[in-house]
């Protein structure tokens, strides 16, 4: 399976990749991003899915609840 269009773009454009990485670092330092990450880590640890390679992620739902979901479905969703 080949790389996505986005992955190819950033692979071939060093300046754009550098800008994206700077943005990502800044975003991940936000209190909201940290809170979301901590919630997911706690949920995964409590449900036995943290670090065991089962490809299951914590997914935040629109109503604020957390569910277990396959990572490709969770990360592929546009909303």
Image (cartoon, helix red, strand yellow):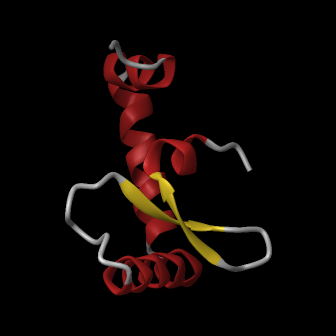
Q: In this view, does 67 lie to the left or right of 17?
A: right
Q: Relative to 77, does residue 68 appear above or below in the rendering?
A: below
Residue plotted at (38% across, 48% down): 21
Residue 64 coordinates in the image, percent (x, y):
72, 79
Q: Which of 47 and 18 is in front in this view?
A: 47
Residue at figure coordinates x 31%, y 70% from the top left: 49
Image coordinates for residue 77, horizontal then vertical, percent:
65, 44
Q: Position of residue 71 (x, y in %)?
A: 45, 50
Q: Please give left or right for residue 16 compared with residue 36 in the image.
A: left
Where 15 falls versus 74 (above or below)? Answer: above
Relative side of 15 to 65, left or right: left
Q: Report the front residue among 13 and 55.
A: 55
Closest to the observer, 64 or 19: 64
Q: Which residue is drawn at 74% across and 50% down?
A: 79
Residue 32 lies, in percent from the top left, at 59, 80
Q: In which quarter of the image is residue 43?
A: bottom left
Tell me which residue sits at (55%, 44%) in the image.
73
Number of marks in the rendered image: 0
Q: Quadrant of the N terminus?
A: top left
In the orientation shown, which residue stands out farthest toward the left?
52
Task: Give the quadrant of residue 13.
Answer: top left
Q: In this view, does 53 lie above or below 51?
A: above
Q: Is residue 32 above or below residue 11?
A: below
């Amino acid at each position: 399976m080949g790389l996505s269009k986005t992955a190819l773009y950033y692979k071939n454009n060093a300046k754009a990749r550098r800008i994206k990485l700077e943005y990502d670092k800044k975003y991940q330092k936000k209190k909201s991003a940290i809170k979301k990450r901590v919630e997911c880590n706690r949920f995964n640890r409590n449900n036995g899915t943290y670090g065991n390679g089962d490809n299951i992620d914590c997914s935040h739902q629109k109503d604020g609840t957390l569910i277990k979901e396959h990572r490709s479905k969770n990360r592929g969703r546009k909303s």
